[in-house]
Amino acid sequence: MGRYRNVSFLAAAIFLQILGLAVQVKRSSENQPSRLIRVWAVSAITPPEKALVRVQNGASDIWHNYFYLRGVRQENRELREQIEQLQLDQVRLKQDADQAHRLQMLLGFKEQFISKTLAAQVIGSSGSEQSRTVYIDKGSRDGIQLEMAVISAAGVVGRVINVFKSTSQVLLINDQQSGVGAILEQSRLQGVLKGKSSGELVIDKIMADEEVKPGDRVLTSGGDQIFPKGLIVGTVDKIEKGPEFLQVSVKPTAALNRLEEVLVIVRKEEREPPSTATGMRASDILAERLPSVPDKPAVPANVPGSAARGAIPTNGVRTHPVAPGGASQTAGQAKAPAGAGSTAAKPITPVPGSASGSTGAPGSKPATPSSNSAAAPNAKSSPTNSKPVANTTPSQPQPNPPGDTPQ
Amino acid sequence: MALTYTPREQIEVYRFSLPVTIIVPVLAVFLQAFLPLRFPFFSIFDLPLLVVIFFAMARRSQVAGLVTGAAIGLLQDSLTHQPIGLYGIAKTVVGYGASSLGVKLDVESVGTRFLVITAFDVIHEVIYFSIAHGMVRLNLHWNWAHELESALANAILGVFLFALMDRLKDRA
């Protein structure tokens, strides 16, 4: 018996571990049986990681804030110029956003707002190429819960899959067990973004006859009920055509293998966008922009002031063009800040065209039945489907433009 | 790179102090989890595996080798989101195999260490993939080029690391 002692030990050790594996695989709540072991391991490994990250950040801060200030004046000048340029851009974008908000109100559209985020530091990883997860320095006592979305300034990062007291484990979007409801910005095709074992990101199950172009931005569709709609995930890198489906490779915008700080979305709300036009109804504003029967001029044409109303030409048709498709198309043209950085602090403006994006309205076509089903939970917020916008607008009362004399 | 057979009576058996036995494996797992975030290329290495091979070959006891392998593997498993036991089983087998080899071969030379680490790295990956695919139904993609690259990188690092860790050995 002594001859087989070592082999027996080996067999016993392997048998016990296989048994443990089988139990974990069999139970659907995989984390429960092994929870205690994980807590011990994480408790042993993460405190030194936290300490090391703090020391590293402290040293980096001292260096950057006190010693390495070369080129700061030049950088300051450049940043001032950049601010001026951005302020100009902001004015233009605000107008577009206001218009989009008004039209969304008209459509009864509900936006998803990120109402609270929590900044966290990435302190460690799983250390395995087969498990693309990272640990952050915030846990249950900071309000982190399972399935919370994690983003960075550059884009979507992942979701929380394990919460400990002072740390949490985040499954990155490029892990093969991850899945994100995604929509292509240009083609409006929807699908599920998945990771491969090599760490690549792909959207599969898009029919081979669909047209997808490299460089097209990939945004969250909101269909997974985890990530709010409109966050940028990546750009289309390459497309491989299969007999039935396209294999769309996506390059993530967030540096998933070099993460330092992330934001955990701890609270999101769904509400109607805020009205920006004081005292004006959205329908009034829309009606103002639609072609309509001209008002009878109350004052003679040569009276100063009436000339200023150049928006109504002599043929009586206003010069603001409304494209076919009416409100939804106009909403679709609204510029949306898709970067996560801008959305983290502000309400998420929907994806261009996404006022009807995931609701099944025109402009959003599901790629396949399977991808459609992935986005199906989102279909509940679809008041837009039933609103015949184009039909209702002509019957809107024509408001008296400012400056006009009431008749 | 000559492999030399050493008679059993000439083989030296080493042991390690308790702090070294605990701290070195934990440090290996810690560095494996921490360094890839700062240096993404580091994910190609498997420091815990190198530590398992080193301890197993130095102790030359199969039971000690498999226990070391199982403990380090399970610790590594618990940091992932996969079921616990994948690395555990793979490293148990590697620990047993490395200590068995340590009994028969002179594993002190650089050449032997290089070959042994390369071989055990590939064996480790084969076992991991087999269990992950067969039992856990993970859809892993086997890439020979990547695995060989990883094995060679680990072997090069292991040669230097083993030389460093030789200083921690106490003669039994």
Image (cartoon, coloured by chain):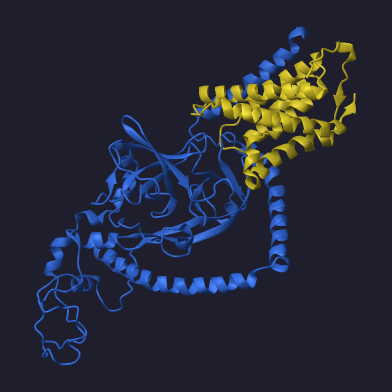
In the foreground, A303 or A337: A303
- Determine the residue positioned at 28% across, 62% down: A331
Q: Position of residue A325 (x, y in %)?
A: 19, 58
Q: Is residue A181 above or below residue A320?
A: above
Colour applied to chain B: yellow
Colour applied to chain A: blue
Q: Position of residue A248 (x, y in %)?
A: 39, 39
Question: How many circles with numbers are drawn on the protein?
Answer: 0
Q: Is residue B49 visible?
A: no
Q: Is residue A392 above or below residue A242?
A: below
Q: Is residue B59 visible?
A: yes
Quick one: quadrant of the C terminus of chain A?
bottom left
Quick one: quadrant of the N terminus of chain A?
top right
Q: Position of residue A284 (x, y in %)?
A: 21, 74
Q: Is residue A15 above or below residue A264?
A: above
Residue A89 lies in quadrant: bottom left
In the foreground, B134 or A366: A366
In the foreground, A239 or A291: A239
Left or right position of B110 against A330:
right
- Determine the residue positioned at 20% across, 68% down: A321
Q: Position of residue A87 (x, y in %)?
A: 44, 74
- Determine the residue positioned at 71% across, 60% down: A58
In the foreground, A146 or A286: A286
Name the residue at the bottom extreme: A303
Left or right position of A380 against B68:
left
Q: Is residue A28 above or below residue A341?
A: above
Residue A305 lies in quadrant: bottom left
Left or right position of B32 against B160:
left
